[in-house]
Amino acid sequence: MLEVRLTKRYFPFKLDISFSINKETYNLILGPSGSGKSLTLRLIAGFERPDNGYIKLNGRDITGFPPEKRNIVYLPQNLGLFPHLSVYENIIYTFKAKREKVNKGYVNTIIEKFRIADLLKRRPTSLSGGEAQRVALARALVAKPKILLLDEPLSYLDFHIKFQLMAFLQLLKNEFSPTVIHVTHDPIEAFKLADYLFILEDGRLCFEGDKYDLFNNPPLGFGEKIVKGLKIIESLRG
Amino acid sequence: MAILTSFEGACLATILGCILGVPIAYLLSRYEFIGKRLLESIVNLPIAIPHVAVGIALLSFLNERTVLGNLFLKFHITFVDTIYGVVIAMAFVSISYVITSALIGFNATPRELEMVSRSLGASAPYTFFHIVLPLSMPAIIRGAILAFARSVSEIGALLILSYYPKTAPIIMYERFEQYGLEAARPVTALVVFLSLLIFFLLLFLSQKRWASARG
């Protein structure tokens, strides 16, 4: 469904990746800081141009498309909630931006599923970290994206909120089946959520497969370290 | 009449400064291009050079014998001793305030917000007018108020480029030169009072209007 084959020179490394992902799968790109994970997302979203190569969505080359024509929603680390708009205005923003009528039925379903009905009149700055995450995910889903890009969405959260939100991401995955590319450096997120895993190191993909493949055949470097770490956690659990 | 000319000129100069200055500030905030450092230096030039020199430079470039002056003449616009001259001189000396403030506003607006807006289906202009501009507006308004205040008080460039129609500072200067301190006091007091009144009124209104803009 999504085919990515591109290179991009970006100090201090060169991103050189080639992969494809299937429709309605939850894909996780795992890698250390500065490995090119966020850059990969920005290239897919259309905020950066590759030096060479292409990005194809359902067989169509979208490499030269502006971000608004790709139907790929990007959720950054800081969530990007618009602070001057209410939560409800944030959620229906996509309809206003595309000059479309608000699909109230669908919007209400999302609001209900993400339990944000009592937050609608508030401003994003008054929300807790967990509430803001739910609103941002709801807003992204309302746009019915072909692909949802999550750029380390759980990285700044407290441990218990992080697990609550992982449950919401599971709900998103089970009930709405979006195609997701989620980047993180946290292997726990990866093992909890991913259908398919990619490991990116120094701008190159050094592993792709499911979590069992990773456990059985970990690649050298970052992949090996995280499998070792996870095995220690497993042994502590007894 | 001179007070009205001052405020009319300052209003038009502020509007002109915003029309030219806000896009320049956005360009400086968001894009990397050859000559960016030079442009950054140029926008601060009006603050750095003496305003009499600004008047001389504007007169040199905009008088009717120059290419630029001739071009404007075709649209029946001349700058020597006209309200257009007053506006252009005031805009020139005050535009730096608009650009600097707008730049602070744009730099404080995270780029991720633009990215999210675009990815949700908004075009670049829609994103600018619905996300970036509202969030930067308090800073732009602060810059506009400062530019307005700076324009009202301008005299150096006006003495050279556009002595007529006379503005309040020119009247003050004339009264002082011809009749001394006593004669200059009433008009000075009136101008200072009106300037402060308008300055604080604009500041109050802008704070009230945009207090919640950033949530």
Image: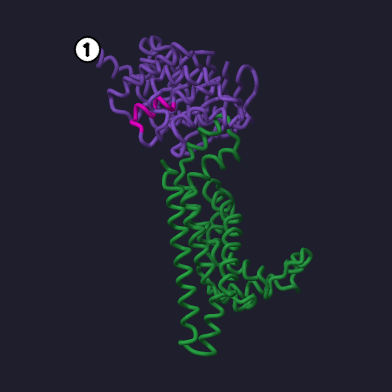
Q: Tell me, by letter, which chain the rendering colours purple.
A: A
| Outermost bottom residue | B179
Residue farthest toward the right in the current orientation of the protein: B74
For image coordinates 42% across by 18% down, the residue present is A112
Q: Which residue is mark 1?
A: A237
Q: Nearer the viewer, residue B139 or B113?
A: B139
Image coordinates for residue A153, horizontal then vertical, percent: 40, 27
Residue B95, compared with residue B127, is above or below; it is below
Q: Is residue A228 left or right of residue B19?
A: left
Instruction: Identify whether A108 is placed above or below B117.
Output: above
- Look at the image and tell me in which quarter the N terminus of chain A lies: top right
User: In the picture, residue B81 is in which quadrant?
Assistant: bottom right
Task: Please provide percent x and percent y for residue A193.
Answer: 39, 15
Q: Nearer the viewer, residue A104 or A198?
A: A104
Q: Is residue B161 visible?
A: no
The percent coordinates of residue B35 (x first, y second) are 58, 55
Residue B144 image point, x, y percent = 51, 58
For the C terminus of chain A, the image quarter is top left
At 35% from the left and 24% from the top, the residue drawn is A186
Tag count: 1
**Within the magenta stretch, is there residue A118?**
no
Q: Residue at x 52, y 37 (%)?
A: B114
Quadrant in the rendering for residue A81: top left
Which residue is nearer to you in this view: B114 or B2? B2
Q: Is residue A131 located in the magenta-colored stretch of the structure?
A: yes
